[in-house]
Image (spheres, rainbow, N blue to C red):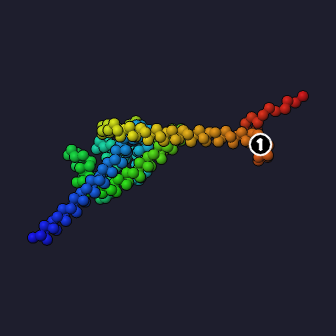
Amino acid sequence: MWNVMRSALVMWVVLSLSLMAVGDDQKKAEKQLNKISAMAADLTGRRAVNLSMADQLKVKRDDLVAERRANDLNYGSLFVVHELMASGTKLEDIAAQLKSGKKIYDVGNEFHADWKQIADDAKKLNNKIEDNLYNFFLTAKKDDPAQAAIYNAATDSVVADGAVSAQDLAEAQDRYLFWRNRATVKQDAMLEHNKEQAARQTIDPVRKGGPQADQVGNTGPAAVPR
């Protein structure tokens, strides 16, 4: 009798700890996924999110846009869909659950989502998003022409994009401004370096045989023939 009760108690404790671990992993995943969705609330941020997700998932940028429109998914939820698909769940099964009214996290639990793996992958995606955001600002807000031709952030929007908390939006704005300001500092440093190098070439008569007028522009007043 006591052995049976002891075994039942042990099983209950193990099950409780397991459920607590899953719940903790899901919360960590939700935090990372909310960061993705919040950054996509801004057009420039959305451009970086779309580019980063397409690169990490190895899919086309316009395919992500089409999937969002078909199922009214923000980018965080769309990432969960692709993680579930990567573990073997069929897209049509996920779509059916979503159309029945279930939330993405309920769908994830329905298909036994590995929330720990999703949290880790979403964190990697957030790092990639920040890298692409920084590079965008660093290149004076210029997209690669080939990328710009296949993606328009202004037309990449769904109703679900509005389901972002004020706190998540504020944190996304802080990240956005951090990388914009860091890029500005880098640009200023590069500009000063270029000015310094140009000045050295202009006044250094030894460097590479002296400055050439067709290489560095005006090298000083020329002697006027008498």
Q: Give SS at disc 1.
A: loop
Q: Amino acid at mark 1?
A: Asp
- Residue at the spot x=39%, y=40% of the render? 171
- Residue 66 visible to an observer of this rendering: no
* Towards the viewer: 5 or 148: 5
Quadrant assignment, res 201 = top right
Q: Is residue 69 above or below residue 15?
A: above
Q: Position of residue 107 (x, y in %)?
A: 24, 51
Location of the C terminus (image quadrant): top right
Seen as rendered, the residue at the extreme top is 226
Quadrant assignment, res 3 = bottom left
Q: Position of residue 29 (x, y in %)?
A: 33, 51
Seen as rendered, the residue at the extreme right is 226
Quadrant assignment, res 154 = top left
Q: Position of residue 106 (x, y in %)?
A: 23, 49
Location of the N terminus (image quadrant): bottom left
* Towards the viewer: 201 or 96: 201
Q: Position of residue 212 (x, y in %)?
A: 77, 41
* Towards the viewer: 180 or 217: 180
Q: Which residue corresponds to mark 1?
A: 204
Q: Is residue 96 above or below residue 18?
A: above
Seen as rendered, the residue at the extreme front is 2
